[in-house]
Image (cartoon, rainbow, N blue to C red):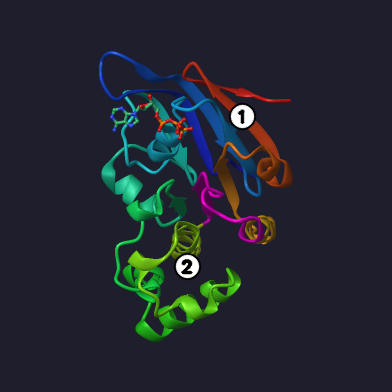
Amino acid sequence: MSALFTLSDLHFAYGPERPVLTGASLTLAPGERLALVGDNGAGKSTLLALMVGLLKPQGGTIAAFGRDRRTEADFAEIRPRAGFVFQDPDDQLFCPTVAEDVAFGPLNLGAGKAEARAVVAETLAMLDLTDFGPRVTHHLSGGEKRLVSLAAVLAMKPEVLLLDEPTNALDARHRARLIEILRGLPQAMVIVSHDAAFLDALATRRLRLEDGRLQAIT
Ligand SMILES: Nc1ncnc2c1ncn2[C@@H]1O[C@H](COP(=O)(O)OP(=O)(O)OP(=O)(O)O)[C@@H](O)[C@H]1O
């Protein structure tokens, strides 16, 4: 089967002084749970942002879901299909309540109110967050916000998940539950994490980002 994402020879720098990516290439195949590791500041979050067009590479190509992607319209089309769970949930959640945050994506994709309500209930239940719907998002703990940001992305039923440090701020119980949930999902995913045991439990393949390039870890 063809790759979901193919990144070829990506070059990226935020400014002229220090390049972040200097020829990074990867493919993501259906069903893979690809771990992306590397030192702080290596460029892992930057790479995820490039995959969904939040940043534009200065060189190289990005193909996703069978087509080359260049323009903002190309990336607008793939963003709901490649759900990005940000490192910081405060960048993701902006509605007054949890239910509204989780409903936002489905409503934006054209779901009716009743359908969105059903997706919210189903997604919150899957993450053991059944009673969280009416909670004020802003008042949640860091770990709770992280789970709600995952719910908000899963509610869009993406074909690929891009997870940036998903275990940050999670206690042992929720971390174990997250492993169980992710193992049960059919989607291909890219997981950026410094949590080695978490990656051991999930990854089907690993890449290290070092000096701006990706290398397989065997
Ligand atoms: N908006 C920005 N403007 C300028 N430099 C940035 C910006 N965002 C990130 N950087 C720099 O780019 C480099 C790569 O950052 P990035 O967040 O992608 O690394 P990372 O591998 O995800 O790190 P970590 O493991 O610490 O989360 C870092 O040196 C960072 O300081």
Check residue 207 in the rendering and tell me which mark sits there, or answer none.
1
Please name the amino acid that badge 2 sits on: Ala
Helix, strand or loop at label 2? It is loop
Q: Is residue 81 above or below residue 108?
A: above
Above or below for 4 versus 154: above
Ligand 1 shows up in which quadrant of the image? top left
Image position of 121 with respect to 189: above or below = below
In the rendered image, which quarter contains the N terminus?
Answer: top right
The residue range painted magenta reads 159-175
Instruction: Name the side, left or right, on which 68 lies relative to 203.
Output: left
How far apart are labels 1 and 2 at the CA level?
28 Å
Q: Could you say where residue 22 lies in the image, as x and y percent from the top left?
A: 43, 17
Residue at the spot of label 2:
155
Q: Mark 1 or 2 closer to N-term?
A: 2
Let me know if residue 109 appears in the view. no
Q: Is residue 87 magenta?
A: no
Q: Nearer the viewer, residue 22 or 75?
A: 22
Badge 2 crowding class, 10 Å Cα cut-off, few under 14, some 14 to 19, many 20 or more, is many
Q: How far across and how far down the image is residue 184, in percent?
A: 69, 61
Q: Tell me the quarter of the image containing the C terminus.
A: top right
The vertical placement of 116 against 58, above or below, is below
Q: Amino acid at mark 1?
A: Leu
At mark 1, the secondary structure is strand
Which of 124/84 is in front?
A: 124
Q: Position of residue 110 (x, y in %)?
A: 34, 72
* Residue found at the far top of this picture: 17
Dot 1 crowding, Cα within 10 Å, few <14, some 14–19, many 20+: some
Q: Is residue 17 left or right of residue 180?
A: left
Q: Residue at x 36, y 67 (%)?
A: 139
Determine the image quadrant of residue 13. top left
Please tell me how many numbered marks the rendered image carries: 2
